Amino acid sequence: MNLLLLEDADFIAADRVVLRDRRLKHMQEVHRVEVGDSLRVGQIGGLLGSAELLRLEPREAELRISLDSPPPAKLPLTLLLALPRPKMLRRVFQTVATMGVPRVILVNSYRVEKSFWQTPFLQPEAIREQLILGLEQARDSVLPQIIIEKRFKPFVEDRLPQLAEGTLGLVGHPGDFPACPRAVEQPVTLAIGPEGGWIPYEVDLLRQSGLQPVQLGERILRVETAVTALLARLF
């Protein structure tokens, strides 16, 4: 935990918070804090700053905070992602939050198993938990927007063209396609498929909506690896 993220409910005054949950345990067991120590903090959806530990007890801690710095800028990106398998989904949520993705749209695909949509990891509180872990790693305070679109064809045909308008539209897909560009300086709409990639029909629909297929080479990557590799290459 590189940043202590604060919820609105933690505040007992404009510059005071009391913590009693896993953050307290982390302070005690990992940071091994003592009264008077300073910690990096941020308010979820708000500014970053520092906190002085005023009181430390076994079941709660009180801190005086000062928030004066903006969070790091997000990437100019909309990430369209075929729903990964549940265990991988949690890691992907953390990754996108850590890397500064502002908006993720989860979509269906022919290779996405129907059972994946029933996972409890898609519940709002479960999504938020993983995003916060990613923000803590990156020292960011602004949660990415997560949008769920279960119907691939209507979304791609009816809404994606407008979302992708004015951006560099790309489909990460293995095959005989141009290499993914490097260090772009414009907004990007990026679609990443399931393991094994999109089926040809889906690639064609995405292309018709303004997204051009690009590849990273011959190797087939796991979704979480592809997300990291493509974002690092693009930005």
Image: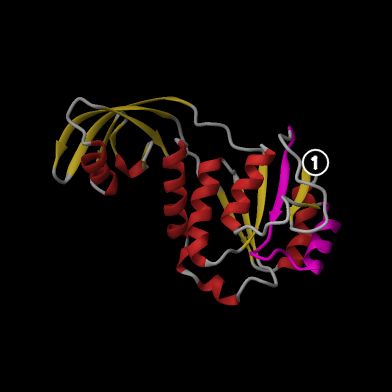
Left or right placement of residue 15 versus residue 183 in this view: left
Q: Magenta span has 216?
A: no
Q: Residue furthest front?
A: 218
**On the image, which quarter does residue 61 sit in?**
top left
**Quadrant in which the N terminus appears:** top left
**On the image, which quarter does residue 26 sit in?**
top left
Left or right placement of residue 105 versus residue 199 in this view: left
**Quadrant in which the C terminus appears:** top right
Can you say whether 146 is above or below 155 in the image? above
Q: Please provide percent x and percent y for residue 129.
A: 42, 53
**Is residue 157 visible in this depiction of the protein?**
no
**On the image, which quarter does residue 206 sit in?**
bottom right
Q: Please provide percent x and percent y for residue 11.
A: 30, 38
Q: Find the magenta span and give its range.
A: 185-210
Q: Please provide percent x and percent y for residue 234.
A: 69, 40
Residue at the image point whose x is 55% and y is 76% from the top: 115
Left or right placement of residue 171 versus residue 78 in this view: right
Residue at the image point whose x is 72% and y is 47% from the top: 189
**Is residue 163 visible in this depiction of the protein?**
yes
Kind of residue sitting beneath label 1: Gly
Give the camera-side residue of 181 and 68: 181
Residue at the image point whose x is 18% and y is 43% from the top: 60
Q: Please provide percent x and percent y for residue 201.
A: 81, 68
Instruction: Say how many tags the image has.
Output: 1
Name the residue beneath numbered marker 1: 166
